[in-house]
Image: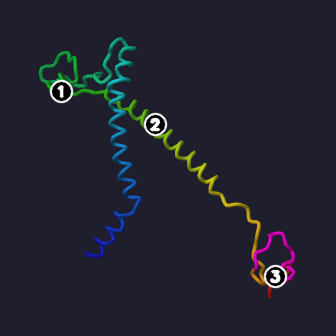
Amino acid sequence: MKKIIQEYKTFALKGNVFDMAIGIVIGGAFATITSSLVANIIAPIIGLMTSGVDMSNLFTVLKPGLEGGQYLTIAEAKKDAAVVLNYGVFLNSVISFLIISWAVFFVVKGINRLREKEEKNTQKPPVTTKPCPFCYTTIHVAATRCPQCTSTLDTPPQ
């Protein structure tokens, strides 16, 4: 049991676990903001373009409830125990997903661009020297004779 607890501590204290936890918290906050954007800004604009229809209140009655009749809102239908298909709420969720995925795409694209720049900046300079295989002095990579020990470098050391 003690070994399992130690392994768990090692796992939990790794940087990747903390990074993932922070990502989940930020992702949840971002999803909340996006849902609010869709419900409070985009959906009303779409509703205005479609003659004032509130997308979150679009539904179809699959089976009338106890009293039956026409339902003006989802709340009325649920209150009467009607079975409804809430396709407006689904459309809002689809729009939220598209916005979130679009935003994540641009974030990942930006991070990849930064990584590429960092990789270009951290590239190793071309190799211009090598050690002499006989005396281990640093010499130019194109040298065929060591200036220190005068060994011919065309042949490998024995």
The relative height of residue 63 versus residue 52 in the rendered view (above or below) is: below
- Residue drawn at x 70%, y 60% is 125
Name the spot of residue 91 as percent of width and height, x first: 36, 28
**Crowd around label 1: few <14 · some 14–19 · many ≥20 (10 Å):** some
Are dots 1 and 2 in contact, CB under 8 Å? no
Amino acid residing under circle 3: Pro
- Asked which quadrant contains residue 46, the reply is top left
- Asked which quadrant contains residue 67, the reply is top left
- Label 2 sits on a secondary structure element that is helix
Relative side of 7 to 61, left or right: right
Q: Which residue is mark 2?
A: 103
Q: Residue furthest left?
A: 67
- Residue drawn at x 55%, y 47% is 112
Earlier in the chain: of badge 3 and badge 1, it is: 1
Q: Which residue is mark 1?
A: 78
Return the residue nearer the eye: 129 or 4.
129
Name the spot of residue 44 as percent of width and height, x first: 34, 19
Segment tinted magenta in the rendering: 137-152
- Looking at the rendered structure, which numbered label has been put on residue 130? none
**Crowd around label 2: few <14 · some 14–19 · many ≥20 (10 Å):** some
Amino acid residing under circle 2: Ala
- Residue drawn at x 79%, y 74% is 139
Q: Is residue 11 magenta?
A: no
Identify the image quadrant of the N terminus.
Answer: bottom left
